[in-house]
Amino acid sequence: MTKRSDEWALATKLVREGTMRSQFGETAEAMYLTSGYAYDNAEQAAARMAGDEEGYVYSRYGNPTNQMLAERLTALEGAETCRVTSSGMGAISSAMIAPCSAGDRVVAASALFGSCRHICSTILPRYGVETEFVNGSDLDAWKRALSKPTRLVLIESPSNPLLEAVDIAAVAELAHAAGALLVVDNVFATPVLQKPLELGADIAVYSATKHMDGQGRVLLGAILGKSDFIEEHIDPWLRHTGPAASPFNAWVVLKGLETLDLRVKQACANAAVLADAIAAHPNVRAVHYPGREDHPHHHIHKKQMSSGGTLIAFSVKGARAEAFKVLNSLRLVDISNNLGDTKSLACHPCSTTHRALSEEEQAEMGLDESWIRFSVGLEDVDDLRRDLDGALSAL
Ligand SMILES: *Cc1c(COP(=O)(O)O)cnc(C)c1O
């Protein structure tokens, strides 16, 4: 039996929602490592395959552990339904490709996770889908780009790596007027801080690899939205192309979700303190933290995100050599392109996550060699502050 109540608050849902106990009454969610399912008789097999009887048929189509995770995520997001996938890119590529056909048009914000940008710039055009990039924070640019019929719009807010804001509600209205679906990659904000569907988006996509697992262990993705859209477009795509989530990974993320609210709130509290400390350092040129009033898009972040988030971007005085020197002087924080982990992680976007972009494309985003992206974890905030201060003072 599945536990569920619409009256539960977020913290309760994160611990309880979707739990499906077996006949053994286990307290923790069971991990169903099975690819197939046995039937009582041939008639039942035929009925299940025909869809006349409820039940599992094959783990590429569905699995009880994955189902528990999907239900917990549905409750967390306030969506109608959810499908989980092998990775965040499995979710985003499916959500983008499945509803599109040759001749369709896609508009995306130019500041996107590298692989999302690659899908728009390289993969979709090969299949006859025209794509256009716009500056995500420029509403006039959105109005111009969405003056033509459009199938799909993809945005990320806060964006990677400079944490710029896209006004989700405003872009949703423009997208809908152009006949488009709005897909929001909500990884940086997490559903604890920002709810794209409530702001008017049609689909929210996640890399659960980040804050949802939150402990740097597994890859997993999720697609959330209306049941009719998911059933019409996403289910056939997932079933026949096969980016199914591993039930082991789904189980790890289920356990991760139980502490998501606590972890994200504590990491945000640490990030707020560290953003101020970084901004006050004489070797720092600029800090982008959505929770600080000097962030160029603070007013937009503030109306759609309940706190400043767990990521900070900062520019050191100098260029690549100085940024590398700071990274190499960190003793506690790891150099890693991952994010949303209990361990604080820092990277140099120009030479790693955004390496594939041309210099002009980087400049268009406001990115240059002096920037460092910092994902704040759960270490003691004073230890982190000392580590950052020591690394910045090494310049
Ligand atoms: C990590 C990430 C992805 C991709 O997720 P994977 O789980 O690595 O496939 C997509 N979008 C954003 C914003 C990310 O941070």
Image (tube, grey):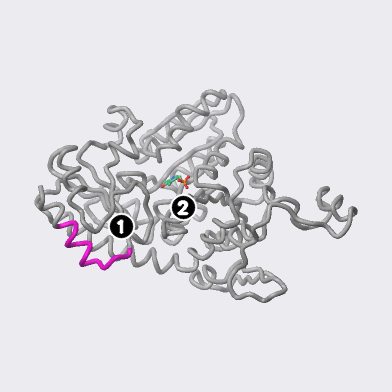
For the point 48% across and 63% down, the residue is 256
Mark number, residue 344: 1
Question: Circle 2: is it few (<14), some (14-19), or many (20+) Cα within 10 Å?
Answer: many
Residue 98 placement: quadrant: top right
**Foreground residue among 80 and 40:** 40
Start and end of the magenta stretch? 378-389
Q: Earlier in the sequence, mark 2 or mark 1?
A: 2
Whether residue 116 sits left or right of residue 384 in the image: it is: right
Q: For the residue with label 2, is its CB less than 8 Å from the closest atom of ligand 1?
A: yes
Q: Is residue 61 above or below residue 133?
A: below
What is the x, y in percent for residue 134? 39, 33
Which element type, helix, strand or loop, lies under badge 2? loop
For the point 67% across and 60% down, the residue is 64
Split into 4 quadrants, where in the image is the N terminus? Answer: bottom right
What is the x, y in percent for residue 164? 32, 45
Which element type, helix, strand or loop, lies under badge 1? loop
Residue 110 placement: quadrant: top left
Taken as a whole, is the magenta stretch helix, strand or loop?
A: helix
**Foreground residue among 186 and 388:** 388
Question: How far apart are the two marked residues, 2 and 1, measured between alpha carbons?
Answer: 15 Å
Q: Is residue 273 magenta?
A: no
Q: Which residue lies most toward the right here?
A: 43
Whether residue 354 sits left or right of residue 218 in the image: it is: left
Q: Which residue has dot 2 on it?
A: 209
What is the x, y in percent for residue 34? 68, 56
Q: Is residue 46 above or below residue 143?
A: below
What is the x, y in percent for residue 298? 29, 52
For the point 67% across and 45% down, the residue is 235
Residue 73 placement: quadrant: bottom right
